[in-house]
Image (spheres, rainbow, N blue to C red):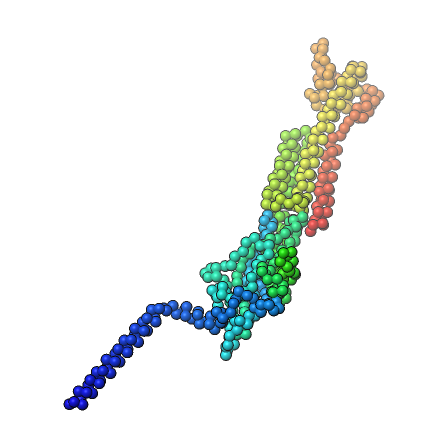
Amino acid sequence: IGMTAQSNSAWKLQYYTANTFRGILLLILHSVIKRSPDITKARGTKSEQILRIDDHDFTMRPGFGGPAVPVGVDVQVESLDAISEVDMDFTMTLYLRHYWKDERLSFKSNTNQSMTFDGRLVKKIWVPDMFFVHSKKSFTHDTTTDNVMLRVYPDGKVLYSLRVTVTAMCNMDLSRFPLDTQTCSLEIESYAYTDEDLMLYWKEGNRSLNTDERISLSQFLIQEFHTTTKLAFYSSTGWYNRLYINFTLRRHIFFFLLQTYFPATLMVMLSWVSFWIDRRAVPARVPLGITTVLTMSTIITGVNASMPRVSYIKAVDIYLWASFVFVFLSVIEYAAVNYLSTLQERKERKLREKLACTCGMAYPGMLSASYSEVDANTTGNYGMPEGNGVRRERMLIELAMETDQMTGRVNSTTYSNVWIDTHAIDKYSRVIFPASYILFNIVYWSIYS
């Protein structure tokens, strides 16, 4: 019995001891779980330990004090969003990738597989400080997260990629607009590191630049993309490697043919219609000339409103102003015709007065040849006063019905010397104006096309 009681007490002691130990373990486990519930954070810390980020100073470039760090670059152009002649710039969206080696990030791996991270690790290591020269604005896309990727290989090689949209300056020469071809460049350069610390180069030469096949612009045809590399010098800091993305754009002409050239040509042709209208139809010819002039002014104003205020003459300006001159000359042509017609009427009136005063009624047939086709109401007013009940219309009829061959022949010759055929100006204009405009078009399109 004594032995049995002793064994029971020993068993109870072991039972209470086990329960107490179990409770202590539960309390410890509960406290540990309560202190670090973020498992992803623990994994991030583990990755940083693999890369030994805390063991190095990543504010310094790789191999500080040694040769320049070679940084390869390649670009995937996603889109050309806009080309602005007014602002002299373009907008481009691209994938910018950097390649370099940082032995401080090397790690042991049996499978030789790389590790990929997002933008959160980029802030803790060294990356090249690239910027776009002559850029007006740029940003890294952040939807739904920052479009940044970092890939590290076991030997320390690093791939750093980001998606960027940049608006950069493009100096355009519009002297041949809209028959022009423009070449723009996007320039990439390190901001802090000179060529002694960082050497930028295209990773695979011209093949480092790739473009999306779906890239298209409404006004331009993309002819060529190519890369170049140059050195840029700043007097205060030194020499820097600069990478260029060059692309050539040729403007589509069909839009401007429909909106500018065809309307201007039609207005010039419309101004020629006045040459076939009777010179005495003033209400028909004057509004036609004024309408064409005002329409040409509207076309010129509309074209210049969408263009920058450059100090040189553009190709479209030459065409529009030449068309404006042709339209304006058609108005001047009718003014000349009308003025010469007025002079003709004055000379006819003076001649009638002179013949009536010198010849009287002795030679009544002398004006029959000259006035056979003239209206009696207009040609009868040649200054003879009414007297003795004889009207001027009756006198004109008597002059027309009498015949005197010798006198009529002499006086008709005198009258033909002062005759001015104003119809000849319209006849010549019907040929000279179209021929001159066709010649102008041949010269213009042969030079600019």
* Residue 11 x, y percent position in the rendering: 22, 85
Q: Residue at x 63, y 41 (%)?
A: 300
Residue that lies at the very extreme toward the left in this rendered image: 1
Q: Residue at x 56, y 66 (%)?
A: 61
Q: Residue at x 49, y 71 (%)?
A: 55
**Quadrant of the image occupied by residue 29:** bottom left
* Residue 367 x, y percent position in the rendering: 77, 21
**Quadrant of the image occupied by residue 23:** bottom left
14 left or right of 142 in image: left
Residue 203 visible? The answer is: no
The answer to which of 186 and 31 lies nearer the viewer is: 31
Q: Is residue 76 above or below residue 337?
A: below
* Residue 127 x, y percent position in the rendering: 54, 65
Q: If the image is split into quadrants, where does the N terminus sit?
A: bottom left
The answer to which of 255 and 391 lies nearer the viewer is: 255
169 left or right of 15 in image: right
Q: Residue at x 35, y 68 (%)?
A: 35
Residue 279 visible? The answer is: yes
* Residue 285 x, y percent position in the rendering: 65, 32
Marker count (numbered)? 0
The answer to which of 398 and 83 lies nearer the viewer is: 83
Residue that lies at the very extreme toward the top in this rendered image: 388
